[in-house]
Image (tube, grey):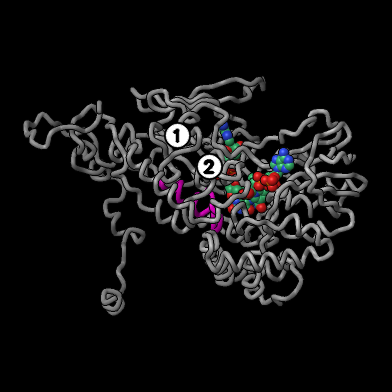
Amino acid sequence: MPGSFHSSANDTSSTYKLGDFCIDEYRPIRVVVIGAGFSGITAGIRFPQKIPKVDLTIYEKSAGAGGTWFNNRYPGLACDIPAHCYQLTFEEKRDWSAFYAPGSEIREYLQGIVDKYKLMRYIKLRHEMVQAKYDEPSGKWHLRVRRPNPETGVLEEIEDVADVLVTAFGSLTRWRLPDIEGINDYKGQLHHSAGFDPLDKTWQEVADAWSDKKVGVIGVGSSALQLVPALQPRVSKLVNYVRGQTWLAVPFAANTFANLLGRDPGAAEDFTFTEEERERFRTDPEFYKKFRYTLETEINSLHSSTLQGTPMQEMGRELFRKNMEKKLAKKPEILKTLLPDFPVACRRLTPGPGYLEALCEDNVDFVSTPIKRFTEKGIELADGTQHDLDVVFCATGYDTSFQMPFDIIGRNGVKLNDKWNPHPVHYLSVCVEDFPNMFMSLGPNSGVGSGSLLALIEFEILYACQAVAKMQRERLKSMEIKAEAQRDYDQYLENYFPKSVYAAKCRSWYKAGKEEGRIVGLWPGSTLHALKSLEHPRWEDYNYEPLDPVENRMYWLGDGQTYAEKTLTGDRAWYLAEEYIDRPPDSSEFLSSAAK
Ligand SMILES: Cc1cc2nc3c(=O)[nH]c(=O)nc-3n(C[C@H](O)[C@H](O)[C@H](O)COP(=O)(O)OP(=O)(O)OC[C@H]3O[C@@H](n4cnc5c(N)ncnc54)[C@H](O)[C@@H]3O)c2cc1C
Ligand SMILES: NC(=O)c1ccc[n+]([C@@H]2O[C@H](COP(=O)([O-])OP(=O)(O)OC[C@H]3O[C@@H](n4cnc5c(N)ncnc54)[C@H](OP(=O)(O)O)[C@@H]3O)[C@@H](O)[C@H]2O)c1
């Protein structure tokens, strides 16, 4: 392999010359991140923290940072897991207003982090990556980015070059309207959940002006389950068009929530925190920590429910069926249509607070007759029924095929879209053969069916940081996953899923919107499994090219000294700093742990 380290072990003729640099005289390294959601924001904190002399840019095509939470504004948008389990490990928020925090609060939380770490130094808004091409001779990524010209506002393309590319462009960003006949003829207000823009208002202000309106919501995924209860009390008539089935969970960790707060577990569901509870979170760090830790433990204890035939899966099925039956007692005909024949969690499971209750209200119609087409005034069903509608929300999901709307071109001109056809292939969701110096966060097979997603995102970013640190420390031009390592990982992945509930027949974004086939959305294992897999990279699974034209793999050792010694500046006893000392337990603890 040209440019690889290949001097022979027997070659003792020493033409080798020491590098004229200190071991820690690191080269500047340019990292470009695509996307400024949770992943890109975490990258914006971790790269400058971990990589000396990093030159970082984060390109974000939207007008603000926050990703999912900046882009989505639809009525009812909220976290569907406890908000205490949906925050970065190192950035706690003490004043969530509700167990399932509203989307606006998560957006503010993320904006607060952007401000705290001054991330706008790195983030370039309204900059859309339109091409990324790997240049083999230099080992760099050549990038094309579309942005409005800062002076004229006219769209233009600029070029950039990076040593390392980090994709953080999300798996649930490529939304599209459904392919329903006549959709362009409809004259009322038509929104996709992810495209809804309340402009300078809140969604509540917009929806409160709809008290005389007939509103349709198409879908029964997580977005629809939030739209329906948010709109129902505000509109004159609501019609929910549901072609499939779904499980509604009981609220995650509801008993734990009640017990920790000293509430009556049997009382009616109310997931807003009282002012006293919020004050306690703010002022009692031990209570806050216990609350967060207990919920996180609970959410990470559900993995066996995602495996077919386990007692937890069967228990969930029974519990959720009874819960749905109870909540739909007023309109039992809905249960017959909605109750799935597939296992719990086969498609994204959510408690959907208030959804079933809203379906039972008098101003709501649940329609399972297939939609035939849109008309100018509304929707026509397959049986000919016409519905006049003022507003229609298509909560119809995303393109999760991982066929990207722009070209990412790797070694030998290989296009990522071709490499990922018919389905994405990768190594541990973090990199792809033929795409050197490229790392991914929330790429294919990165979601979780249970457990904490943000911890996984943090570990993916830390994996990328470790790789970049290695490239910088060891003076590497490129690192690229070996074909055989990617193949072996693929075999693991293919063999993992058949025993999981995700493999059952149900339409889901986990399978790129299909009922059957390859699972592309989820990590093959639990969240805790993912963290362990990513924590210690197997560097032997990569090929490397040296940066310098020197046939000696130890060139990076430099001239035998550190920069602090050479210049007599900086800390020359750093290993005595408290953060570096790894204190073993005292002798009695040590002996007892050694005996185990
Ligand atoms: C409506 C909704 C609600 C959700 N709720 C939850 C929840 O309650 N709990 C949970 O665990 N998960 C939830 N998720 C999943 C959620 O997407 C992740 O939890 C997380 O926010 C993903 O962060 P990310 O930064 O990886 O991706 P994203 O948040 O999707 O951010 C990607 C960013 O990349 C930008 N981008 C894309 N392409 C380009 C380009 N070519 N050039 C420049 N920028 C680009 C996008 O504009 C976007 O800002 C939800 C998803 C959606 C859609
Ligand atoms: N915080 C949260 O709770 C939250 C909120 C929103 C999204 N999310 C995340 O985003 C993911 C996507 O959620 P989503 O609800 O936006 O999308 P989704 O889960 O993919 O659901 C899309 C819905 O639209 C229906 N649909 C699609 N095309 C249709 C058509 N032509 N005619 C009729 N119905 C059609 C689907 O029908 P079928 O039922 O037949 O498939 C499905 O019910 C979630 O799984 C979750 O991971 C989370």
- The kind of residue tagged 1 is Leu
In percent of width and height, residue 428 lies at 42, 46
Which residue is label 1 attached to? Answer: 165
Label 2 CB less than 8 angstroms from ligand 1: yes
Label 1, residues with CA under 10 Å away: few <14, some 14-19, many ≥20? many
- The kind of residue tagged 2 is Gly
Magenta range is 447-463
Q: Residue furthest right?
A: 212
Image-quarter location of ligand 1: top right
Q: Any magenta on residue 460?
A: yes
Q: CA distance from mark 2 to mark 1?
A: 12 Å
Element at label 1: strand
Most common SS among magenta residues: helix
Which residue is label 2 attached to? Answer: 40
Quadrant in which the N terminus is drawn: top left
In percent of width and height, residue 571 lies at 30, 50
Residue 37 visible in the displayed image = no
19 displayed left or right of 384: left
Displayed quadrant of residue 182: top right
